[in-house]
Image (cartoon, grey):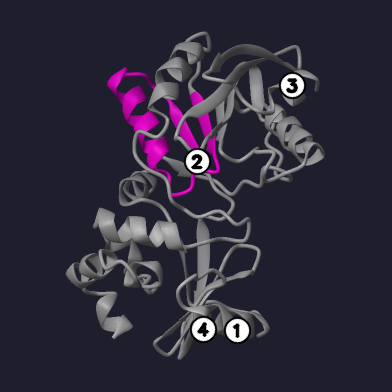
Amino acid sequence: MIKIASKNINFLEKVSKIPVLKHFFILKISENFNDIKSELVLNKFYRDIWVNDKTSKKTEKKRFSDLDIPSFELMKENKDYIIHDIAVSNGICSNDFYELLAEKKKKFEFYISDKFAEIKVKKGFITKAYDNENHLIFAYAGCFYAADKNTFFPLTVLLFKLLQKNKTPEKFDYSLLLLHPEVSEKVKKKKFKFISYDIFNTEIHEKFTFVRAMNILNLGYFNEDKIRTAVINIKKSMKENAVLLVGRTNAKKINNASFFRKQNNKLAHLKDINEGSEIKKIIENL
């Protein structure tokens, strides 16, 4: 049934609307995932996939609409437009910013990254999906779905815990980038450059003129020491006079964010949007 459903988008759209079923029915990963264009099905999928850092891939278009114009205005002081959007989730907000820059008829390079965007899949009677750190994300045993988070069907959690004890496969059948179709298309056409980037460990030196790190450096996710490490690492990747945007979207969908400019290896505060970033003082004191 699930194999058939994964190829029947109309069926999946109908199931996604059923109050109880929508909480556990998830699109079975297949090589055909990137061919799916249904926003309803994709949103269901992004919401229900939880990766190892306990975040989902869910986001929405125009989420940072109040940040994109100020970002563009502050970028103008730089000769080159070399952008890095970190922790993009499914990337649709990067696409919004890309479209704005394209409308302005500016020449730019656009890099996107998300540590948990790629999943690796091992097929079989037990089909298992892993993140890039080889943590099990979800699985199927026959037609039974397994995940570590399910309010309505505890059996899925029990099955997940059992499968989690299994040895990680040495080889996988295929991998997928969990990106929105509009973003995937731009990656294929090399309009976006998807890069492997770990905010705490990857070192890139003086490359970018604008870096955005929204909804990643949150005190709810990391302690102050980890955040300092991440910001120092990001700063290394920025050219002199480059701009950094950090912030968090709160429960009311308000973006509290702050802009900084790299000057003499320091990050000077430029302006706040709404209440500003909760880590503003940490950055100023580096």
Which numbered dot is residue 241?
none
The image quarter containing residue 245 is: top right
The x and y percentages for residue 103 are 28, 22
The image quarter containing residue 239 is: top right
Between discs 4 and 2, the one toward the N terminus: 2
Which residue is under mark 3?
281
Q: Indicate which label's residue lies in the foreground, 3 or 1.
A: 3
**Residue type highlighted by circle 2:** Ile
The x and y percentages for residue 274 are 52, 19
Disc 1 residue crowd, few under 14, some 14–19, many 20+, Cα 10 Å: many
- Whether 110 is among the magenta residues is yes
Q: Indicate which label's residue lies in the foreground, 1 or 2.
A: 1
Residue range (magenta): 82-111
Whether residues under marks 3 and 4 lie with C-beta atoms below 8 angstroms apart, the answer is no
**Distance Cα–Cα, label 4 vs label 2:** 37 Å
Between discs 1 and 2, the one toward the N terminus: 2
Which numbered dot is residue 163?
1
Q: Indicate which label's residue lies in the foreground, 3 or 4.
A: 4
**Distance Cα–Cα, label 1 vs label 2:** 32 Å
Where disc 3 sits, the SS reads: helix
Which numbered dot is residue 155?
4
| Residue depicted at x 31% and y 17% | 104
Between discs 3 and 4, the one toward the N terminus: 4
**Distance Cα–Cα, label 2 vs label 3:** 26 Å
**Residue type highlighted by circle 1:** Leu
| Residue depicted at x 33% and y 24% | 100
